[in-house]
Image: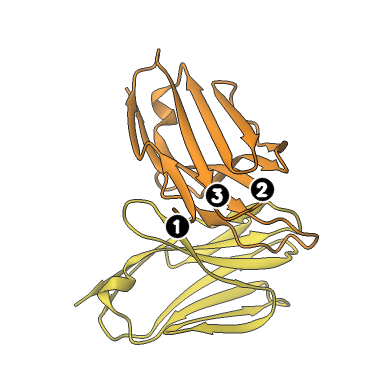
Amino acid sequence: KNEVEQSPQNLTAQEGEFITINCSYSVGISALHWLQQHPGGGIVSLFMLSSGKKKHGRLIATINIQEKHSSLHITASHPRDSAVYICAVGLGNEKLTFGTGTRLTIIP
Amino acid sequence: ETGVTQTPRHLVMGMTNKKSLKCEQHLGHNAMYWYKQSAKKPLELMFVYNFKEQTENNSVPSRFSPECPNSSHLFLHLHTLQPEDSALYLCASSQVGRQGRETQYFGPGTRLLVL
């Protein structure tokens, strides 16, 4: 069992819908990261959080340390949001442990 | 040029070839990483260099040989690879501090196909 589990694995939605991607982890962490990977491979870091909530544009990330759970929300989704979203946890050193990713497709 | 760059972007090699992947970071970071991304699997950490010293070798076969000549450059030397080594190889860098919460910045990756 992977230490980081994401759901759903695949998500298809219509443009404009509110999107939620979930991440659960089983170990104590120092921080949780949300990453975006576009077709072609490049990965961009979206958020790093260790408590509470962060917002950047239409993206919102929340974390509940007690429940070992984080969510990534996208409001007013757009086809350009189509990508793989990856959750990763940091264990207090420079290493990250990654989930398998959620493939999001937004249909115009 | 900014960020993390990787060359080549695509590589096809035979099992008897020797090739090298190159990564360069222009962010002034002190740690660099090699990751392997295979289809349907999470990113796998291969190697970590912190202040040019290798701090992690995640049970990687010896046919993969990393080299970090300075804090800005990282190489992955490849020899006698197997077809199952075909994957996307990603380089990343970060500025490591005491709390281990640093953001890693990724390169675009090298897509490797071993025939």
Q: Which chain is yellow?
A: A
**Residue at image coords 40%, 54%:** A42
Separation (CA) of disc 3 from disc 2: 8 Å
**Residue B9 position in % (x across, y down):** 35, 40
Residue type at mark 3? Ala
Q: Could you say which is closer to the camera, residue A62 or residue B19?
A: B19
User: What number of labels is visible?
Assistant: 3
Q: Which mark is residue A43?
A: 1
User: What subunit carries mark 1?
Assistant: A
**Residue A19 position in % (x across, y down):** 39, 80
Q: Residue furthest top?
A: B16
Q: Which residue is mark 2?
A: B31
Residue type at mark 2? Ala
Against A70, residue B92 (above or below) is above
Q: Which residue is mark 3?
A: B92
Q: Are marks 1 and 3 in contact (CB under 8 Å)?
A: yes
Q: Residue furthest left?
A: A108
Mark 2 surroundings: few (<14), some (14-19) or many (≥20) residues within 10 A: many
